[in-house]
Amino acid sequence: MSTATPIRELADRLAVDLVQAYEQARVATGNGGTKHQAQLASGQPLRDAFGAFGEEAAGAGVSLEDAMAASVEALQHLFERFGGHTADPATMLAAGIALAATARAYDIDGRPPTPTRDQELPTQLSRLAALHRVNRAVTAHLELSEMLETSVRVVSETVGSDACAVFLYDSATESLALRAAVGLNPASVGAVTIRPGVGITGRAAVERRPIAAPDAHVHEAFLDSPGMGDNVYASQVSVPMLLRGANKLVGVLNILTVGRRTFDDDEIAFLQTVAGELAISIENARLYSRTDARLRRKVAELGTLQRVSRTVASSLDLDQVLRLLAEQAVELINADAAAIFRLPHPPGGKPSGEVNPTIEHFVGDEREVVGPNRDRLVRQVVRTGASQAVDIDYVDGSGMVFCLPLRSARETLGALCLRLRPNTELTEDELGLLQAFSDSASLAIENAQLYQDARHGLETASALLQEMHHRVRNNLQTVAALLSLQLRSAEDAPWSVQLREAISRIQAIAGVHDLLSDEQRLAGTTVDVIAKHVVDDAHSTLVPPGLHVEFEVVPGDVVVPSRQATVLALLINELITNAVSHGFEGRQCGKVEIRAWHHDGLVSVEVSNDGEAVPDGFVPAESSGLGMKIVHRLVTSDLRGQFTIGSPGGQGTIATITFPLAEPEPESTLDALSMVGAG
């Protein structure tokens, strides 16, 4: 049988049914607007018309391909006449609904088509299971956005709707914002807002009760929102989400279906229960978000404060510390500018209330102040120790300045002033952060000031010590010069040898003080440098004419403090004197070697010569010579060490002084401070 005639008749009848649907919409709305006609036809009437067409075409033996082709042609004529565009999501969704209705009318097994029916809400025990499923879904996430996305999907599946949306109420803006949806235009989420009282959704929010609209497009409160894509749905239920105790509005839950659907009282009650559970979960997620954000902000603030404290503690240079403090203060609360003020005052005294504060360091754009308000503010903050915020007049306008004291345990060091950006209000947390920063800044300033004072004191002590060594050296050299004059006038006198030894001792001590008058050697010097100075003087004072002595000082890095250096110079001088006087007696040449080394926390200094050997069993302490007595006394009493002398192998003499190294002199603290400051 030919299908050309039946399909054409059925297609013409479909076109008539569609026009009647639009005419009924015009009568129902009373305004003749095509917008409402399109909304109605794209919903249940559109689905019914194409479903009936599909059943008749299937019954007449028309193939599914021919029926779909006729449906597409009817849709094209429909959209050309009443409006519609293929780029419009609503138009394409309406076309899909129509073609799906036609296809469902065909039974692929050849059986008579079964009538379609809306999925009913679960009842009794199954409804409890559905509620449990919703609860499990909404409590699976603490992040609000994730929880909402999961909620609309699960609720839509549970209640058998074609679309589901959640609007959240914002009390600050007094508006409802679309925050999650399925079955609607995804681009509208986060972009669509509704005022309470406007539309079915807004009315449900204001009246605090569910509103069910089986024919949503003809409802008196219906609001057309083309961007959302909800105009293809015939029925809508809007249920306010309320917190039971306070009747607080959290938002609105919307359920939408393509086919016309009537919700009974039990179904509405079930949706209210779902909305109540959603309200609790949403509020918990909001509290979690606020708490989590607050904790993250606190962690960030503590991290910033730790970084600031570490930065300002990295230097002991006062100028650098002040610069770092001003820079970090600006960064801490995003201020416009920062300045650190100090009040001049005598050491140990308190700042004078009449003296104008001075800016030690400034960061930011400079603005010229008009009037004395700023200086008065700084003086008052320093005097009272309390933070204050005032408006300051500038040449180019006014600005808010927040000033807080910089206090140590002993005194108020100054004040930190921050020029805030326009419309800035410091929160309680920011005030606490600034106070903690102020405490760290005060500690850094006090440490830098103490370091500066200590360094200045040590530099003064160093200069005085240098001058003392210089004067002692000059006085000793004067004494040695006078004794040398006396010696020249009595070279053959019986006491000339003793006088020459005395001159040598004095010059040895003078040589050490000459070394210590050098700033680099205040804390001490090396043994080889001491020995070289003693040897240089020995050439001119100890070695008699006709005797050639070769001196060798082995280089080393053994450093002794200044007190031990003086004693060591005398000891080396005495041992050289002993070698020249006794070891090289009757000879024309000789050699003296001096070296020093560390071992087991002790210092050993060895003076050896190739002269006559000392007698076996020689005991320095029992010697009748003045030189050996001086050596023994200085080693045991001053150095608290040991002295040995002998002639291994019966040739030459080796004298060894062993002593513990004394603690560094206080002067060395200056070098330590210099190293700390440089670091």
Image: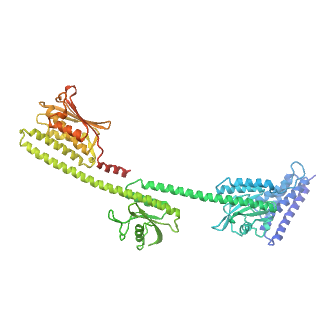
Q: Is residue 552 above or below residue 395?
A: above
Q: Residue furthest top?
A: 649
Determine which quarter of the picture holds residue 212. bottom right
Q: Is residue 484 left or right of residue 523?
A: left
Location of residue 625 in the rendering, given as x and y in whole percent from the top left corner:
14, 35
Location of residue 245 in the rendering, given as x and y in whole percent from the top left corner:
69, 64
Location of residue 326 in the rendering, given as x and y in whole percent from the top left corner:
43, 61
Q: Is residue 596 above or below residue 352?
A: above
Of residues 123 and 608, which is closer to you in this image? 123
- Residue at 48% in and 54% down: 306
Determine which quarter of the picture holds residue 211. bottom right
- Residue at 46% in and 56% down: 308
- Residue at 12% in and 36% down: 544
Determine which quarter of the picture holds residue 189. bottom right
Of residues 156 and 647, which is closer to you in this image? 647
Q: Residue furthest bottom?
A: 371
